[in-house]
Image (cartoon, rainbow, N blue to C red):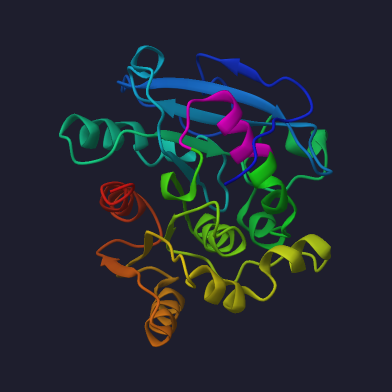
Amino acid sequence: MLALSSCASIPVINKSSELYLAGPAIRDYQPEGLVEEVQYECSVTGPTRRRMIVYLPKDYYISGKSYPVLYLLHGARGYETSWIRFGEVYESTDSLWREGKAEHCIIVMPNINQYDDDDDYAGGRAKNAFESIWEVDGKAEWSFVHDVVMLTDSLYRTIPDKDHRAIAGLSIGGYQSVGFGANHPDIFGYVGALSPYFWASGQKHAYNKAFYGGLKQKIKNEFGSEPPSGYYLYAGKWDLTRPSTLRFHKWLNRKGYAHSYTKYPGSHDWPDGWTQEYKDMFQKLFK
């Protein structure tokens, strides 16, 4: 079980969110759940603080219950509100909860981009595709468990074990999710990779090697005596990542590692791609 601790300084929690960042305006949809914005201190060099969006069941503060957690990652050119602004995550989640098709949980959407410093971060700016792909260097990934997972467990009523933690993301976020599952098989019991962009690579320093190095051996260990409860791969019919996702699926099959692979009719985009894939995956978590 993950030992609990929080970041060095007290995090700031606001009851409203999405007040800034580039991108189209948030849709007029009014979420049925509770939206909170958490600003927290980082444990590695780069920006001093980052921000994550937390979506809670509407009765969180009166139910007294503890909940599973889904950590939902963005992709290239993304940030912590990408799933909200583009992916209709509130609408999809509320609908599935309302219909009893998905387990109630806490959804955490962090900013997992790498930034050099506070000026580079600039309030959580979106990065262009070139920056996103070539700056995946393992630093933000290395600090994720401490800065985001431990912090979430300290701030909210979570069920702090692997059977009640899921990590999922799209494109580069899908690649990062594969890495998180492989590096921390004792922490994440569910892994979702939506169009994983396996070609992302950054500077070859210690963080990069520590997080992304020896991935196949780490996956072998991940699927050892206590394999994931769920491991889900998705790619669209016209998706640029479908060939590599299919190869990864076939490799997992050859090794006998239990997982699912689903091809959707869309491409490397929303709404026919990742939005629909999220809906399918979300119904399978924490069952």
Q: Nearer the viewer, residue 43 or 223?
A: 223
- The residue closer to the viewer here, 74 or 77, is 74
Report whether 124 appears left or right of 101.
Answer: right
Q: Is residue 39 left or right of residue 238?
A: right
- Nearer-the-camera pick, 102 or 153: 153
Q: Residue at x 43, y 63 (%)?
A: 195
Residue lying farthest to the bottom in this orientation? 254
User: Which of the 4 quarters of the picture holds residue 176?
Assistant: bottom right
Residue 227 image position (x, y, % from top left): 44, 66
In this picture, is 266 found above or below 282? below
Q: Position of residue 103 (x, y in %)?
A: 28, 38
Please tell me whether the stretch drawn in magenta is mainly helix, strand or loop: helix
**Picture residue at 52% right of the left edge, 25% below the top:** 156
Magenta stretch, residue numbers? 147-159
Compared with 242, 254 (above or below) is below
Give the residue displayed 38% in from the left and 18% down from the top: 64
Whether 25 is among the magenta residues is: no
Q: Is residue 61 left or right of residue 42?
A: left
Q: Up-down: is 24 above or below 3?
A: above
